[in-house]
Image (cartoon, grey):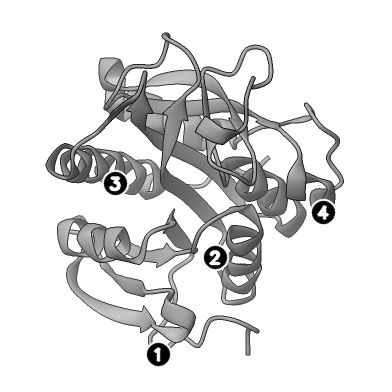
């Protein structure tokens, strides 16, 4: 039995990861037919069901920050997850990323903190699974774009200067990519820019963007896995 998750329903081989348990429920209602709660232990709500296309899919909350995401991902690997897409939020670190925009991390740079637990030094980079990234990009078209992001253990607005080349920052993507690589899980991410130039995305707009990102993730995971 995994150390943190206590599944009450089967876990699918494909999973969408979200930090916020409320967003897990939102996406379960949006993407799954008759979703069943597959975890409620530790407040990490998770749901499993079938998409309208008939694909089995788990939507699992991971809590806040990279260490929590890495621990949950290890449990999911033990339960049979083999591909995962993070649907999360990020903060623009300059003027290039626009409020409400969907970013597809083509590279995630470690900005310190818990990155050392994954054998990463500051400014080391991690990468997503290229097939999942390509599928996300194909589905979103002009509605999403590849970008370099940074991950750290505190809110990006408190962190000062981000690594060169990163246009946004979050708290989980480096951990997800690095731990997924160690576990043999193919992983990618879609990030919603929720803060930009002292502005914050409203709750309704965030929900709309999260549903769009979730649909992209579900579509990408519906594609057959490409063996490397």
Q: Quadrant of residue 4?
A: bottom right
Instruction: Give the total of numbered labels.
Output: 4
SS assignment at label 2: loop
Q: Which residue is disc 4 drawn over? A: 117
* Image mark for residue 129: none
Q: Which residue is disc 1 drawn over? A: 8
Q: Residue furthest left?
A: 204
* Image mark for residue 81: 2
Depth check: give the residue in front, 61 or 114: 114
SS assignment at label 1: loop
Depth check: give the residue in front, 132 or 3: 3
Q: Which residue is disc 3 drawn over? A: 214
Residue 31 in picture, x, y percent from top left: 21, 57
Q: Earlier in the sequence, mark 1 or mark 4?
A: 1
Q: Is residue 123 left or right of residue 212?
A: right
Res 117 seen here: yes
Depth check: give the residue in front, 86 or 14: 86
Label 4 close to label 3 by CB (< 8 Å): no
Residue 94 lies, with reference to residue 13, above or below; the image says above
SS assignment at label 4: helix
Dot 4 surroundings within 10 Å: few (below 14), some, or many (20 or more)? few
Label 3 close to label 2 by CB (< 8 Å): no
Q: Nearer the viewer, mark 3 or mark 2?
A: 3
Q: Earlier in the sequence, mark 1 or mark 2?
A: 1
The quadrant of the rendering that contains the N terminus is bottom right
Q: Quadrant of residue 108?
A: top right
Q: Mark 1 to mark 2: distance in Å?
A: 15 Å
Q: Nearer the viewer, mark 4 or mark 2?
A: 4
Residue 198 in picture, x, y percent from top left: 35, 24
Q: Mark 1 to mark 3: distance in Å?
A: 23 Å
């Amino acid at each position: 039995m995994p150390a943190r998750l206590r599944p009450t329903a089967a876990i699918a081989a494909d999973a969408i990861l979200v930090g916020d348990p409320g967003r897990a429920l939102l996406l379960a209602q949006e993407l799954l037919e008759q979703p069943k709660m597959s975890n409620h232990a530790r407040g990490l709500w998770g749901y499993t069901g079938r998409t309208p296309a008939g694909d089995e899919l788990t939507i699992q909350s991971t809590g806040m920050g990279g260490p929590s995401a890495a621990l949950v991902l290890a449990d999911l690997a033990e339960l049979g997850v083999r591909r995962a897409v993070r649907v999360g939020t990020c903060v623009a670190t300059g003027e290039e990323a626009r409020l409400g925009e969907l970013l597809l991390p083509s590279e995630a740079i470690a900005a310190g903190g818990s990155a050392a637990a994954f054998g990463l030094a500051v400014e080391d980079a991690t990468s997503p699974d290229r097939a999942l990234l390509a599928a996300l990009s194909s589905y979103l078209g002009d509605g999403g774009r590849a970008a370099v992001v940074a991950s750290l253990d505190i809110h990006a607005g408190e962190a000062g200067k981000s690594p060169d080349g990163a246009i946004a920052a979050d708290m989980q993507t480096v951990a997800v990519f690095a731990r997924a690589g160690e576990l043999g899980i193919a992983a990618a991410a879609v990030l919603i820019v929720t803060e930009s130039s002292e502005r914050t995305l409203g709750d309704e707009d965030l929900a709309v963007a999260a549903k769009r990102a979730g649909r992209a993730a579900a579509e990408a995971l519906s594609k057959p896995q490409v063996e490397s």
